[in-house]
Image (spheres, rainbow, N blue to C red):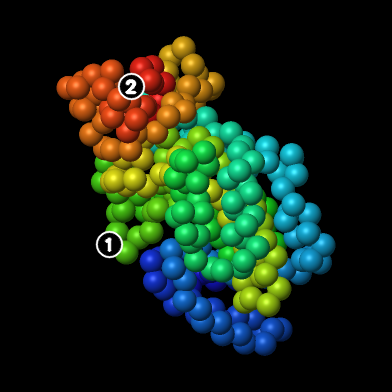
Amino acid sequence: MRKQNQLQTTTDLYIIIFHSRKPAQKEMTVSIFLLCLAAIVQQSARYTEATEFAARSSISPAQQNEIVGKHNALRRSVTPTARNMLRMEWNPKAAENSKWWGKKCTFRHSPKESRTVNGIQCGENLYMSTAATSWSKVIESWYNESKHFKYGVGATAPKAVIGHYTQVVWYKSYLIGCYAASCPTAIFKHYYVCQYCPAGNVGSLNTPYTSGPPCGDCPSACDKGLCTNPCKHMDQYGNCNDLAKMSGCKDAKIMKYCPASCLCTTEIK
């Protein structure tokens, strides 16, 4: 355990035991089961949590900009660089879905069927804390899983958790909405939810984007290393590209189930 009064852990199934051994404080032991969540235990001494957190629970335009800006800054900073990384933007529906789930104070992932925007499946990152935390720090905690990740290999240790990081930098996830909920009766009283659309972590986590020169796949639609030309359609099958080439998009079924392959010729998909 780190000497600082903070413990961070993420895992598929984990027991967290936190001991505060500072002489001026009573010893505290907390055990809780988590399912693919991030748990942060922090001390708060310099401000009233209720007041601070109330401001964060309602996502202001400034906080939306902070969330989107932080994600885009981190997406620009990946190593190796990405040739097809989309620029993220705020999505009110994803934020609404995050709020609906966050207010339930249920410390597990939301049902997949509730995580959609215009029929597109969304991914989700969760964070719990005993103290109110800035959105930038929440997002950084997910991104910091990158220290256990190697591009093309995946996790660098058998039990390392990298899924929050790979979702943050998943090339195709360009819509984001978040919410911070107050859970006064829970051990971790502050609950942060972000949903990403389209969902990341589909297939192998080893390559969350295609490496190459920034904007290599979108030279005419680039914003400081991030692509600005997302495909607004979604294929229903993994082999849609092959199906479209073999049967052609004049086939009604191909057009119905493979619209991205048929309609997005230069966009990132």
Which residue is situated farthest in the front direction here? 252
Q: Residue at x 54, y 68 (%)?
A: 107
Badge number at residue 131 = none
Mark 2 belongs to which amino acid? Cys
Residue 137 in sight from this viewpoint: no
**Residue at disc 2, secondary structure:** helix
Q: Is residue 144 left or right of residue 68?
A: left
Instruction: Please state the horizontal and vertical placement of residue 263, each as a whole percent of the image.
Output: 38, 20
Q: Could you tell me residue 231's position as x and y percent?
A: 44, 26
Q: Earlier in the sequence, mark 1 or mark 2?
A: 1
Measure the C-alpha gap from mark 1 to mark 2.
40 Å
Q: Residue furthest top?
A: 220
Asked if residue 129 is positioned above or below residue 167 in the image, the reply reads below
Q: Is residue 266 left or right of residue 65?
A: left
Q: Amino acid at mark 1?
A: Pro
Q: Is residue 98 visible?
A: yes
**Residue 89: percent from left, percent from top:** 58, 34
Q: Quadrant of residue 190?
A: bottom right
| Residue 95 position within the rendered picture, expressed as x and y whole percent measured from the top left | 62, 47
Residue drawn at x 64%, y 41% is: 92
Query: Which mark identifies residue 158?
Result: 1
| Lateral position of residue 90 relative to residue 8, left or right | right
Q: Which mark is residue 262?
A: 2
**Front tag of 1 and 2:** 2
